[in-house]
Amino acid sequence: GLGKAVQAWPDSDIQRCVVHKLRNLLDHCPKHAHKELRRDYWQIIGADSRQAADIAYADFVDKWTKLCPPVVRSLKEAGDHLLTFFKLPGPLRRSMRTTNGLENLNREFRRRTKTQGSFSTEAAALTLLYGLLAFGQIKLRRINGYQSLSEIGTNELRRAA
């Protein structure tokens, strides 16, 4: 789905889920080093600015290239898409760096539709989704920093001008 979305909106920014990337890194790392890997990884993700994240990233690569090269290869595979959230205002970054909210929505919707054989139209599936959300059967997590959303729209307009 992401590939088709990027084709439809080629100017969109892509954010890789930082939690899933951490799990990938841990898969490439010996168990005895998991705690240290987590600490070093969250130095990157939890940085206050993109510049601080880039410094932490470079330190991570230097250290882990010697300790466990597959970890570094996995980190580099994510490329710049791992740190896209730094383009957002500070309060929004925490919510936007992971896909947990979307995954919860998908999991709940799938659970509710599993008993359905099929839907006659796409509109029928969307109607069910809307109904589940509107009547509180599926709860969406509040996006931290949602008050900053208008700031993003203003910045986008400035960049387009």
Image: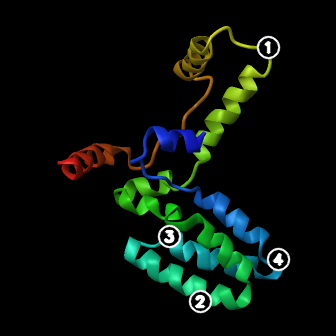
Q: Residue at x 38, y 77 (%)?
A: 51
- Quarter where residue 124 is shown: top right
| Type of amino acid at the residue the image marks with label 1 | Gly
Residue nearest the viewer, comparing 78 with 125: 78
Q: Earlier in the sequence, mark 2 or mark 4?
A: 4
Q: Earlier in the sequence, mark 2 or mark 3?
A: 3
Q: Secondary structure at mark 4?
A: helix
The residue that disc 2 covers is 62
Q: Earlier in the sequence, mark 2 or mark 1?
A: 2
Mark 2 crowdedness (10 Å alpha carbons): few <14, some 14-19, many ≥20:
few
Q: Residue at x 52, y 84 (%)?
A: 58
The residue that disc 3 covers is 46
| Type of amino acid at the residue the image marks with label 2 | Asp
Left or right, residue 145 beside residue 14: left
Check residue 117 in the rendering and tell me which mark sits there, or answer none.
1
Q: Quick check: 48 above or below 140? A: below
Question: Which callout, 2 or 3, points to the residue nearer the camera?
Answer: 2
Residues at marks 3 and 4, CA–CA distance in whole angstroms: 23 Å
Quadrant (top left, top right, bottom left, bottom right) of the N terminus: top right
- Residue 49, visible in the rendered structure: no
Q: Secondary structure at mark 1?
A: loop
| Residue 36 x, y percent position in the rendering | 69, 81
Q: Earlier in the sequence, mark 3 or mark 4?
A: 4
